[in-house]
Image: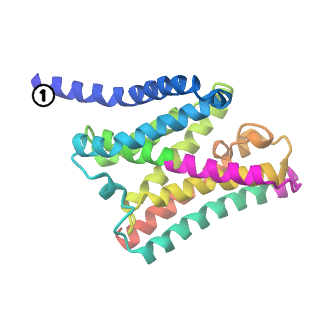
Amino acid sequence: MFRNLLKVNSIFISLLFFPTIYLSGWVLINFLVNFLPFLDLEKSLYGTIITFILFLFFLPSWSKNRWSKNLFKIIKVQGSNKKNLICSLFFEFLKALVIIYIFIFLLIKGNLVFFSINLNENIILNSLFLGAFVGIAEELVFRVWLFEELNLFFSAKRANLYQAILFSLVHYRHDYNLISNFLLFIGLFLLGLYLNTWRLSKNPSILLPVLFHGSLVGVWFLLNNSLTLINKIPSILFGPGNGVNINPIGGLAGIIMLFLLNIFQKRYISKYNF
């Protein structure tokens, strides 16, 4: 019974972590707005950034006291073979580009997209910021914090499945219909599984999923906002949303590519015993 109480207490601690961080970020941004009124214009964005900074501040000590692990050894941003790591990072970037290229190619073949160059400094900066922020933030939250928390209660295999499921669920869109949300869930689930295979890589660095994830988000944003105009498309095939808000992860084309990517990665890891 005592052991069960400890387990319940441990789960309670896990559940409280992010609400506490989020509440602290919300209180802090509301306090800062009184002295820096310009923050109120993008309050939600700045609040998210402050919350993430708080998360980064507490994560090393959380890793040490909660998981009995050194955070920098988990994410391995240091001590890797630099040459091999650079090659692996380039390969992840290339895979992201290939996926986007295939998607655009399918749209062009279906006469669903045409090019209209509208490139400017703001779009470039926004794509870089979005790619970097989403890549770093979501990988540290889901592939590091969430996975390690789940690993306290489940086997690594189950923890991997559960992190992918939760990654999908938190991206639920109330403005999408049931079918769109279901397909989006499948796409994000497959993406979550793939992103966590970095732990089995020859160079297991968090930089690998960060670059792949960030490249998918940043490059797609850049192309969709500056180089292409997309007509109304079949959402089941190419994802829900319209124009710049299309999410390719939630369409059958994106799902098939992510499924094949997972199969390829699994065989690659098995072949080389990574």
Does residue 173 show up? no
**Which one is in front, 227 or 246?**
227
Residue at image location 46% in from the left, 40% down from the top: 53
Per the image, is 61 magenta?
A: no
Residue 111 position, x and y percent, is 88, 53
Residue at image location 27% in from the left, 40% down from the top: 154
Provide the major secondary structure of the magenta segment.
helix
Q: Quadrant of the N terminus?
A: top left
Q: Give above or below for 77 relative to 122.
A: below
Residue 61 position, x and y percent, is 28, 43
Q: Quadrant of the C terminus?
A: bottom left
Mark 1, other Cα within 10 Å: few <14 / some 14–19 / many ≥20: few
**Which one is in front, 255 or 67?**
67
Query: Residue lying farthest front?
Result: 35
141 sits to left or right of 36:
left
172 sits to left or right of 59:
right
122 sits to left or right of 63:
right
Q: Give above or below for 148 relative to 196.
A: above
Name the residue carrying label 1: 3
**Which one is in front, 185 or 47?**
47
Q: Choose top left, top right, bottom left or bottom right for residue 147.
A: top left
Residue 125 position, x and y percent, is 69, 52
The magenta stretch is 108-136
Q: Choose top left, top right, bottom left or bottom right for residue 33.
A: top right
